[in-house]
Image: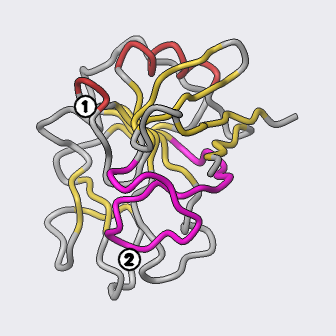
Amino acid sequence: MSQVITVRRSPLSPLRGILRAGPLSLPCALGRSGTTIFKREGDGATPAASMPLLSAFRRPGRMTRLAPRLPVLWTRPTDGWCDAPRHAAYNRHVRLPFPASAETLQRRDRLYDFGVVLDFNLTRRQRGGGSAIFLHVARAGLGPTQGCVALLPADMERLAPVLSRRSRLRVLR
């Protein structure tokens, strides 16, 4: 049986939401442009979609109490994610340095100390349809993301044990 984790926009701000997983109800950050059903690369919006959880990535030595039930990639400085729509590796994990635009998975701001790869525009990829849509660690104060869903570190630690390949993250419009 699959577990559905829901995200509803906050009535107070389109840039924030409430993530619910079983008994947990956690504040979260959404994209700088709110949510959309028409996701495009670079629009800053969180896709309103139902997305299976595929895997996790984490930075060694950070957020050590997390225990997701997902396959985990331990990131290195050479791990990245291609966000260049015209490249064959668009919306894929890549090794840095990379010849096209790609973001690093080991960020100085610690947002990717732990993240979950969501199946948005991944298994049925469309160029320009949005890339690097993750559930990851939030900025202090739950500042908006570039299109991901983000949780404060303590809330991510509470949620991580229930995350599995049988889970779906459903962002509601």
Q: Nearer the viewer, residue 20 or 9?
A: 9
- Residue 92 location (% of width, % of height): 41, 66
Range of magenta residues? 31-55
Quadrant of image for the N terminus: top right
**Eyeballing the image, is 48 above or below 70?**
below
- Residue 156 location (% of width, % of height): 45, 21
Dot 1 amino acid type: Arg
The dot on residue 153 is none
- Residue 149 location (% of width, % of height): 45, 41
The answer to whether marks 1 and 2 mark residues whose Cβ atoms lie closer than 8 Å is no
**Label 1 sits on residue:** 139
Q: Is residue 101 magenta?
A: no
Q: Secondary structure at mark 2?
A: loop
Which residue reaches farthest right?
Answer: 1
Task: Rate crowding at label 2 as few (under 14), some (14 to 19) or many (20 or more) other CA atoms within 10 Å.
Answer: some
* Left or right: where 166 falls relative to 26: right
Q: Is residue 39 magenta?
A: yes
Residue 5, quarter of picture: top right
**Label 2 sits on residue:** 89
**Do we see residue 129 in this rendering?**
yes
Q: Residue at horizontal 57%, vertical 29%?
A: 19
Q: Residue at horizontal 53%, vertical 61%?
A: 36
Q: Secondary structure at mark 1?
A: loop
CA gap between label 1 and label 2 equals 28 Å
Q: Which numbered disc, 1 or 2, marks the residue that appears first in the sequence?
A: 2
